[in-house]
Amino acid sequence: QVQLVQSGAEVKKPGASVKVSCKASGYTFTTYGLSWVRQAPGQGLEWMGWISPYNANTHYAQKLQGRVTVTTDTSTSTAYMELRSLRSDDTAVYYCARAAPGPHFDYWGQGTLVTVSS
Amino acid sequence: EIVMTQSPATLSVSPGESATLSCRASQSVSSNLAWYQQKPGQAPRLLIYGASTRATGIPARFSGSGSGTEFTLTISSLQSEDFAVYYCQQYNNWPLTFGQGTRLEIK
C-alpha cells in the first residue's frame, strides 16, 4: 500500500532553516510527482511546491520562491523540503502529498509540525 | 494566480440531510478541480478529482459537479463522520491553489 512517512517535529529559531523529509513506499517513486502543502494553526491549506522525481522539474508558490527548495533522492524514494530564513509565521504543519496526474493529491504524509520561536 | 473562493464558510446541517458546498474560481479551471476532506488532527483526504470523479473508496453519497468557474460538492444523507472541513483545489494552472475551506458542522 502507498505510504508517505515524514520526519519528526522541529523547533527552530527565526532566521534558521528546516529540512523535512518524506519517505515514499508502495509505488514506483519516479512515476508520480510530489508536492508540499502547509497548514498554519487554525488556518487552511497552502500549496508550497511540486517536484517530478523523474526529471527533477519543479514548481513553487511565488510567495515562497527563493526561500523554499524541494528535492528528491530516487535511491531512497525520499523527498525533501527545505525552508530558509524562517519566520514566526512559518509555524505550521507541513505535509507531503503524492501528486496524481493533474496534479491532485491522492496520498498524504502524516504531517510534520515546524515551530518557529525565539 | 487563480483564486478559489468557497462558500459558505460554515454550514450547519442535521445528520441524514444533504449538504451543498460551493467553490468558485477567479478564472476557468476547466474540470481540473479536486475536493478534500480534513478532520481535526488528520491529513486531508482526496474525495473528488476531475470535478466529478470519486477517488478510490469514497462513498457514493459524495458527488461533485461543475466546470469552468463554478463547482459544487454535494453530500447526501450526512453521516456523523462527514462533519469536517472541506477544501477545493484547482490544478489547471501553476501555482496550484486551494480554497479557504468550508466547515460542515452538526446542526
Image: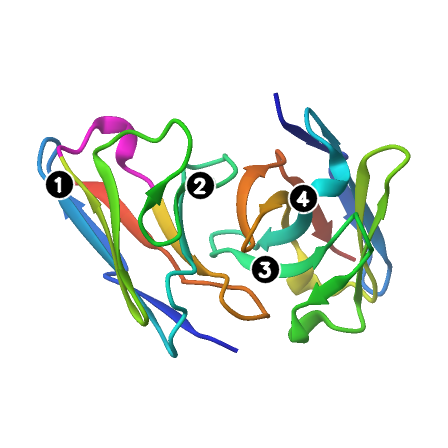
Judge left or right: residue B8 versus residue B84.
Answer: left
Where is B64 relative to B99, above or below? Answer: above
Which is more toward the observer, B10 or A88? B10
Inspect the image, locate mark 1, and give the three-letter code of the amino acid beneath it: Lys
Inspect the image, locate mark 2, and give the three-letter code of the amino acid beneath it: Leu
Please tell me if label 1 and label 2 are on a single chain.
Answer: yes
Which quadrant of the structure image shows residue B7?
A: bottom left
Residue A48 image point, x, y percent? 65, 61
Which is more toward the observer, A102 or A51? A102
The residue under label 4 is A32
Of the 4 image quadrants, the one containing the N terminus of chain A is top right
Q: Nearer the viewer, mark 1 or mark 2?
A: 2
Inspect the image, locate mark 3, and give the three-letter code of the amino acid beneath it: Trp
Q: Nearer the viewer, mark 3 or mark 4?
A: 4
Circle 2/circle 4 CB separation < 8 Å: no
Numbered disc 3: what chain?
A
The residue under label 2 is B46
Separation of residues labelled 4 and 1 (CA atoms): 40 Å
Residue B11 image point, x, y percent? 20, 51
Separation of residues labelled 2 and 3 (CA atoms): 15 Å
Residue A14 image point, x, y percent? 80, 62
Separation of residues labelled 1 and 2 (CA atoms): 25 Å
Q: Tell me which residue sits at (65%, 64%) in the image.
A: A89
Q: Tell me which residue sits at (54%, 46%) in the image.
A: A105
The residue under label 3 is A47
Instruction: Check disc 4 and report its element: helix, strand or loop.
Output: loop
Which quadrant of the structure image shows residue B88?
A: bottom left
Q: Which residues are magenta?
A: B77-84
Separation of residues labelled 3 and 4 (CA atoms): 17 Å
Which is more toward the observer, A112 or A29? A29
Inspect the image, locate mark 4, and give the three-letter code of the amino acid beneath it: Tyr
Please tell me if label 4 and label 1 are on a single chain.
Answer: no
